[in-house]
Amino acid sequence: PAEELHRRIVAAKAALGSRVSILGHAYQRDEIVEHADFVGDSFQLAQQSQRHPEAEFVVFCGVHFMAETADLLTTPDQPVILPNLAAGCSMADMADIDSVQACWEQLEALYGTEPDADGRVPVIPVTYMNSAAALKGFCGAHGGIVCTSSNAREVLEWAFERGQRVLFFPDQHLGRNTAKAMGVDVARMPVWDPRKPRGGNSAEALADARVVLWRGWCSVHQRFTVEQIAAARAANPDVRVVVHPECPMEVVDAADEAGSTQYIQRVVDAAPAGTAFAIGTEVNMVRRLADTRPDLTIDCLDPVVCPCSTMYRIHPAYLAWVLESLLEGRVVNRVSVDPDVAANARTAVERMLAVHP
Ligand code: CIZ
Ligand code: SF4
């Protein structure tokens, strides 16, 4: 029963005290978030994971790639625990290291490896935070970098200073929306489909590319539509439509604003009483925003509730179990990045943190 789980988590957490730091992603359910020492998006949680060297353990209530990133940033003797190891991310799973490697080899064959007169290499690989550590390692090893939705623009600027083109994976929408806002022509952003020869593109399209996007998307944000925006505006012409840049381009174009979890939080915090919002992001986060500002009208842009199904796999029973195990001296569900990729992955994450601390 929920109340008993709640009591068990509170008791175990109290007994562990400052030995444990519990981090919770903004898309987690309320029954998890209420126990978190810090709540934020993947970028904020990555920063936080570095800031608690005193904690013996980090319990990460989020999805696998985020726990891996925390493992890169914590000290080696600080285990990072993911309460349910089945909490993955369908977007991250859309790019695996073998497909990225195969893509890279084809791009190298096409573009060569020599820098141009300005010293810019043919391609800089950029991976969204929402990717396996092996992909971050790939970027670290090939002059590339990691980005999140709150710093994608600054990171792409960094990449264009160093490269003639960018290979951006796994989220095509974040890549397209960000590059478009920087003035890159959408016609020069071919999408690489790893299942097709040359990613499904003509040699000409690739030769003219500024950004090669990967055929990946977020199952939650991909669901938002232009029709939903039209319906929200029809219901209230004054509504402010704010969406996450993982939404498709037409949706971002039709919205009033687009930005990261942190950005959406700031917009809502700063809104004058009475403002009405339709927000295109994960529903647990939208509901919590609505709870914190009862003087605003905050609805999810999608009237059919759509939580992230893998974030939802962090059930309170798992949180109780991992905390009680720690009390008994057992570290369960540790996520640790393979040492073969960790150094390069850390390099790529640290490049991001240097661009946008
Ligand atoms: O935390 C983040 O940056 C986001 C947007 C997470 C996600 O899973 O899409
Ligand atoms: Fe992955 Fe989307 Fe869920 Fe985030 S919200 S964990 S990108 S499926």
Image (cartoon, grey):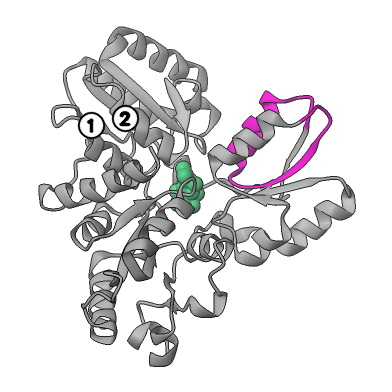
Q: Is residue 17 magenta?
A: no
Closer to the chain start, of discs 1 and 2, is 2
Check contact, mark 1 vs mark 2: CB within 8 A. yes
Report whether 328 appears left or right of 128.
left
Residue type, numbered disc 2: Ser
Under circle 1, the secondary element is loop
Which residue is located at x 50 percent, y 79 percent?
Answer: 188
Report whether 252 appears left or right of 217.
right
Quadrant showing the C terminus: top left
Which residue is located at x 23 percent, y 70 percent?
Answer: 98
Query: Splitting the image into 4 quarters, where does residue 160 fall?
Result: bottom left
Say the numbered circle drawn on residue 49: 2
The picture places residue 313, in percent across and down from the top left corner, at 43, 41
Residue type, numbered disc 1: Thr
Which residue is located at x 45 percent, y 51 percent?
Answer: 154
Under circle 2, the secondary element is helix
Q: Is residue 293 magenta?
A: yes
**Magenta-colored span:** 272-296
Report whether 335 appears left or right of 316.
left
The residue where tag 1 is placed is 74
Query: Splitting the image into 4 quarters, where does residue 121 fall?
Result: bottom left
72, 288: nearer the viewer: 72
